[in-house]
């Protein structure tokens, strides 16, 4: 895994885990979402994410002082909570 971050998106808990495929040189992301209202969890995978875009996301996550804290109010959490995962 290249990087992971926990976010609160529209009330739901969302964990995004980014992986780099060294053979393909692109990223994929696994997203685990816990629905706030139903308390159900589901996962989805997305990709490919171009290497350049993925590198920027990873760099951004690494700037966060606490990526596993969905209550963190740093610029990384604020920006990624307002964007899709790829």
Image (tube, rainbow, N blue to C red):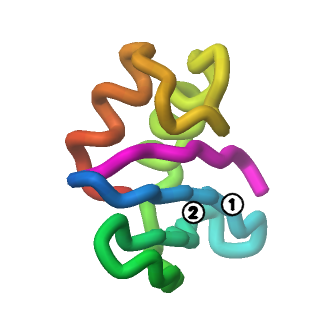
Residue identifier under label 2: 27
Crowdedness of circle 1 by 10 Å Cα count: few (<14), some, many (20+)? many
Q: Main secondary structure of the magenta part?
A: strand
Q: 55 or 6, which lies in front?
A: 6
In x, y percent, where is residue 67?
62, 32
Please give the name of the residue rendered at 44% of the width and 57% of the height, measured from the top-left corner: 13
Question: Magenta residues?
Answer: 1-9
Q: 45 or 22, which lies in front?
A: 45
Q: Is 61 rendered above or below residue 27?
A: above
Q: Is 79 rendered above or below residue 27?
A: above
Q: Is 7 a magenta residue?
A: yes
Q: Is 2 rendered above or below residue 75?
A: below
Please give the name of the residue rendered at 75% of the width and 73% of the height, measured from the top-left corner: 23
Q: Quadrant of the N terminus?
A: bottom right
| Left or right: 51, with 68 as reference point | left
Crowdedness of circle 2 by 10 Å Cα count: few (<14), some, many (20+)? many
Q: Determine contact: label 2, label 1, CB under 8 Å.
A: yes
In x, y percent, where is residue 50?
44, 58
Residue 20, numbered label: 1
């Amino acid at each position: 895994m290249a990087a992971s971050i926990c976010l609160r998106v529209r009330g739901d808990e969302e964990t995004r885990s980014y992986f780099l495929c060294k053979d393909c040189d692109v990223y994929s992301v696994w997203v685990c979402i816990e629905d706030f209202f139903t308390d159900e969890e589901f996962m989805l995978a997305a990709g490919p994410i171009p290497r350049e875009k993925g590198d920027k996301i990873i760099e951004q996550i690494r700037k966060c002082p606490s990526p596993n804290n969905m209550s963190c109010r740093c610029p990384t959490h604020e920006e990624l909570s307002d964007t899709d995962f790829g």
